[in-house]
Amino acid sequence: AQSVTQLGSHVSVSEGALVLLRCNYSSSVPPYLFWYVQYPNQGLQLLLKYTTGATLVKGINGFEAEFKKSETSFHLTKPSAHMSDAAEYFCAVRGNFGNEKLTFGTGTRLTIIP
Amino acid sequence: EPEVTQTPSHQVTQMGQEVILRCVPISNHLYFYWYRQILGQKVEFLVSFYNNEISEKSEIFDDQFSVERPDGSNFTLKIRSTKLEDSAMYFCASSEGQGMGETQYFGPGTRLLVL
């Protein structure tokens, strides 16, 4: 079975500062990892995903994440936070062929301080 | 850009009543999903649907729940007799294929409140 742990239900950073949102996964098979973002009153939007190949994945809005197998991590980063980045961020894993579901973490609410 | 839509955005119902949540997936997508998020908890998988039948369901998806694709565009989730604990945000999602790296596109959700 797969699981995801997101450390920090709330993260606050100053505008222009580094954003780091943590995600650790557990999977008995090579995982496929996803980061979704949810803006207020909107659905979940895919930021980026790791399937195979390059471990550093670039997504939309300047976000990127690095898959580190040795640390079972897939942390999300952005060099310089913008006010528009305020949202809830969800890490998710999909681990077994034929098992279609995404298993989500509890989410991290990102607040940007002006 | 194509998107998944859901109606209604909010629904309030009395315990024991039936509710139907509606979704219009992206038009060329073949795989459909329902997830839910109880306030303050994780987004949880309920069911996946392909070729007019359920392909996978979670333990949450008991006999009170059913899904249907009544026509070529809509995908519905029915809860036959709602319970207080069914109060949650329900998300519909769709994907073009079933590959492991396939992106699931989510709708904005229906917030269901059972009184």
Image: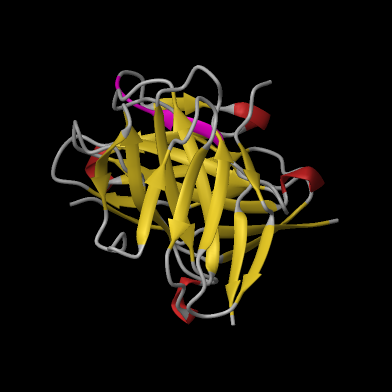
Q: Residue furthest right?
A: A114
Left or right of residue B10: residue B83: left
Q: Quick check: can you spot residue B104?
A: no
Q: Residue furthest left?
A: A28
Report x, y in % for residue A28. 13, 45
Residue range highlighted in magenta: A46-52
Residue sitting at 44 percent across and 52 percent down? B35
Residue sitting at 24 percent across and 43 percent down? B56
Report x, y in % for residue A44. 58, 44
Q: Quadrant of residue B4?
A: top right
Q: Quadrant of residue A59?
A: top right
**In the depicted view, which residue is nearer to us: A20 or B1?**
B1
Q: Is residue B81 above or below residue B54?
A: below
**Can residue A48 be found in the magenta stretch?**
yes
Image quadrant in which the C terminus of chain B is located: bottom right
**Can residue B20 be found in the magenta stretch?**
no
Left or right of residue A114: residue B26: left
**How was the colour assigned to the protein in this rendering?**
secondary structure
Residue sitting at 65 percent across and 71 percent down? B12
Left or right of residue A36: residue A1: left
**In the depicted view, which residue is nearer to us: A88 or B86?**
B86
Residue sitting at 71 percent across and 40 percent down? A80
Q: Is residue A84 above or below residue A30?
A: below
**In the depicted view, which residue is nearer to us: A77 or A5?**
A5
Report x, y in % for residue A42. 69, 47
Q: Is residue B27 above or below residue B66?
A: above
